[in-house]
Image (cartoon, grey):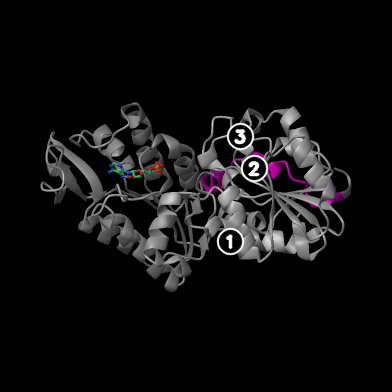
Amino acid sequence: MKKLSIQNLDLKGKTVFVRVDFNVPVTGGEVGDDTRIRGALPTIRLAIENGAAVIVASHLGRPKGVPEDRLSLKPVRVRLSELLGTDVLFAEDCVGDQTEEMRKKLVSGQILLLENLRFHEGEKKNSPEFAEALAKGVDIYINDAFGTAHRAHASTAGITEFVATCAAGLLVEKELEVLGKIVSAPQRPFVAILGGAKVSDKIPIIKSLIKQKVNKLLIGGAMAYTFFKAEGYTVGKSLVEDEMMPTALEIKKMAEEAGVELFLPSDHQVVDSYDPLNSRRVMPIEFTNAGLVGLDIGPESAARFEAALEGAKTIIWNGPMGMFEEKPFDEGTNAIAEAVAKATENGAFSVVGGGDSVSAINQAGLSESISHISTGGGAALEFLSGNDLPGISALDDVKAQNTH
Ligand code: AMP
């Protein structure tokens, strides 16, 4: 069912609560990469230009339900004010009497940023009392935080019980449109690339991709070692989830039966755990001995993966091919970033999600060469797996606009 969008609403004179994703890196009181703040600007601008008084709320980091100075949104207020060219007001707490006073005084065109939602336990617990407190005086709720849409928290789900009209912001609307097309009618060949540390996190997406009969499934990163060990290879001290080995074999079988081509690395960069950088070398997977740790796919695997992407019409990528935070174990991930960009130039529609793959794309300066960079890794995977996202299901359906 299509969800109501901020674009369908009359915002004039309304108090609009926008849940955004301002979970940005902050060091020494300064915002680092502000991509997420920039991402929310179109929705905030649309709201103020249409005469709304706007309350903006987000979480930052993982506070334990109590305030922590280093996780304050104050530095975000500074950057947001600069980007919008207007003074954004700031409430020291996201609920309470003082905030209520500020909300009452807020007029059309003004913006009030609330302090970190996760400074209250009620946020992650989706407490109805906390959700009701957030909703106080709010006419319209907008969810523009796709990255947290797979979580049922007070500001993403609970709040919608207490606000008359609940709609998607521009970012969320775009995500639903793009990912929705991939779920319903992907152009083929459809190639999925998955990496990262854990198979366990990605089982639902792998199974659902196989059911959707993705044409090729490329698996890299530490995840691959669980497949190799399950098949009886020695993987040394590489990261493995032993309890997932039966699942890995099940996945291989499912792929075979569905006619999905499964690609695993054939070589990798290994280190000797006693002398990591000096011992670095590339070797075929089957030569790995008990003392070695695999930290990245090798050049042969990168070339095979690149060839598998040739001619693709739809590509999704989530998860790095190795321990890419540590050079030179970023080489495999960078090679895949280049290959996805090249395939996109040659006509593929590419979607990259997940913090690590997105930063690899950004570091390589390739963001312009990707069709869609998703703002939510986990949320995008859940959506592509066919699961309901609580933060999206809670929004009004287009038809139900006047009956919520
Ligand atoms: P995930 O959160 O499951 O997407 O995993 C991302 C993490 O996997 C990154 O921090 C990578 O450093 C890590 N990673 C990927 N491949 C390897 C590997 N071969 N050995 C150790 N860590 C890895």
Mark 1 crowdedness (10 Å alpha carbons): few <14, some 14-19, many ≥20: some
Provide the residue designation for mark 3: 119
Crowd band around label 2 with a 10 angstrom C-alpha radius: few (<14), some (14–19), many (20+): many
Query: Residue 127's image quarter?
Result: top right
Image height of 137 relative to 191, above or below: above
Q: Quadrant of residue 47?
A: bottom right
Q: Nearer the viewer, residue 177 or 113?
A: 113
Which element is circle 3 on?
Answer: helix
Check disc 3 and give the amino acid type.
Phe
Write the start and end of the magenta stretch as one range. 379-401
Q: Determine whether, in the image, residue 202 is placed left or right of residue 274.
A: right
**x, y percent for residue 92:** 67, 41
User: What is the spatial separation of the Cα atoms under label 1 and label 3, in whole angstroms?
Assistant: 24 Å
Q: Which of these two is toward me, 238 or 76?
A: 76
Marks 3/2: CA distance? Answer: 8 Å
Q: Earlier in the sequence, mark 1 or mark 3?
A: 1
Q: Residue at x 27, y 33 (%)?
A: 230
Q: Amino acid at mark 2?
A: Glu
Q: Amino acid at mark 1?
A: Arg
Q: Is residue 382 magenta?
A: yes
Q: Which mark is residue 115?
A: 2
Q: Is ligand 1 less than 8 Å from the beta carbon at label 2?
A: no
Residue at 36% of width from left, 64% of height from top?
A: 364
Q: Are marks 1 and 2 in contact (CB under 8 Å)?
A: no
Question: Which numbered dot is residue 38?
Answer: 1
Residue occupying image coordinates x 66% and y 52%: 144
Total labels: the figure holds: 3
Q: Is residue 11 above or below residue 248?
A: below
Determine whether the residue tagged by mark 1 lies in a helix, strand or loop: helix
Q: CA distance from mark 1 to mark 2?
A: 18 Å
Q: Are marks 3 and 2 in contact (CB under 8 Å)?
A: yes
Q: Quadrant of the C terminus?
A: top right
